[in-house]
Structure formats: structure tokens, C-alpha cells
Image (cartoon, grey):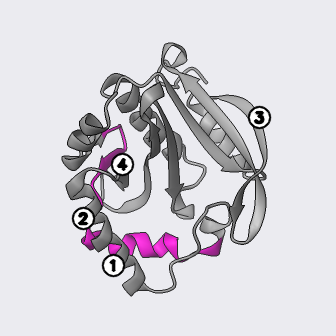
Amino acid sequence: MKRETVYRIFSRLPELETDRLLLRRMQVSDADDMYAYARRADVTKYLTWTPHPNHAYTVEYLQYLASRYRIGDFYDWGVTLRESGRMIGTCGFTSFDFPHNAAQVGYVLNPDYWGQGIAAEALRAVMCFGFRELSLHRIEACYIEGNTRSRRVMEKVGMTYEGIRREAMRIKGEYRNIGVCAVLRDEFRGGQEN
């Protein structure tokens, strides 16, 4: 997999569809929906970023993402409900390891939609795209130790728990243990076997 290929693909971010969801490019018009969850401490408790301090911050962030989408070096989709068009979270690739045909994925979801299988549905679509369209060999996801909800999502889509990297990241001023789950292309069956 070549960096240039990924940049070309993501500069024209393709939409991904599932039964309930449309994964698409985030837009400034999503600011209200994003701020509704991004401002919440319960959402960011196990994330590397802090709550958005105000609505204007969310607008500026989405404006910034527009420039990143243009050059193709941002790999995250807005997760929207097909029925209403409301953006309820994000899901996508957080990084690529180009020489090894591997990538890391991440996701965040509005708590009003937790426990409905939506994170797994979105993640499954992103992983299918990664294996089919990007010819990835390995996809992994990481979580801060204690975030059992996120680990369950990873396992639901067919990832295998690989272990804990002790104090691997300094997050919000504190060294945190990071759990790792991953799946290889030949193991992935759409994650629907679980």
C-alpha cells in the first residue's frame, strides 16, 4: 500500500452504507450534532482529547477537517443515521503503517446511541473498506485500560485481544495502560460471527 494511493482515495472520501448508517465526510453543518457529544466528559473519559469547550471550537475543528480532507490525510468518517441524517459520532482510520499494510482504527459515539450495536456496525464497514479497497493485511484498535465497552466493540467485529502495553501513552498528564486488539485479513469475515 502506498501513501499516495491512500491520500488520493481519502481526498475524495467515499461514502459507506450499512443497514442503519451512512458514513460520510464531516461538514461544518454537523457542528450542532458533534458538539452535543464532544462537549461531554463521559464521552472523552477514555479518549486522548478533552471535551470541546464551546460550540465555536467545534465549528473551527470541522473547518480545519475540511482542509485535511482536501489533501487526503484525514481518514475519519462522520457516522450518521440514514433515517434522520443526524451525525452521532465518528469512525475511521487513525493511522497507517504503510510498509506493513496495516492500520489502526478508532471511533467515538454519542452516548444516546450506546448499547445499540451502532459502533460495531460502523467499525465493521470501515474494516471491510480497509481490507477490500486498501488491501490491508492487519487492522488494530487500541483502548485505554478500563474501557471495557470499547473492547467489547472490538471483539464483536472479530478482533482478537492481544494484550496490554503498560503505561504506553501519556494522556491528560497521566501514563495509561493501552489495550490492543487486532484482526488479520484472512481472519475477517465482516465481524458478524460474534
Instruction: Measure how far apart labels 1 and 3 are at the Cα level.
Output: 37 Å
- Taking the spot 36% from the left edge, 48% from the top edge, the residue there is 75
In which quarter of the view is residue 131 placed? top left
Q: Give the tally of numbered discs.
A: 4
The residue tagged 3 is: 163
Tag nearer the camera, 1 or 3: 3
Q: Earlier in the sequence, mark 1 or mark 3?
A: 1
Q: Is residue 62 above or below residue 148?
A: below
The residue tagged 1 is: 59
Q: Is residue 56 above or below residue 20?
A: below
Q: Secondary structure at mark 2?
A: helix
Q: Which label number is shown at residue 75? A: 4
Instruction: Measure how far apart labels 4 and 1 are at the Cα level.
Output: 19 Å
| Left or right of 26, for residue 141 | right
Q: Secondary structure at mark 4?
A: loop
Q: Secondary structure at mark 1?
A: helix
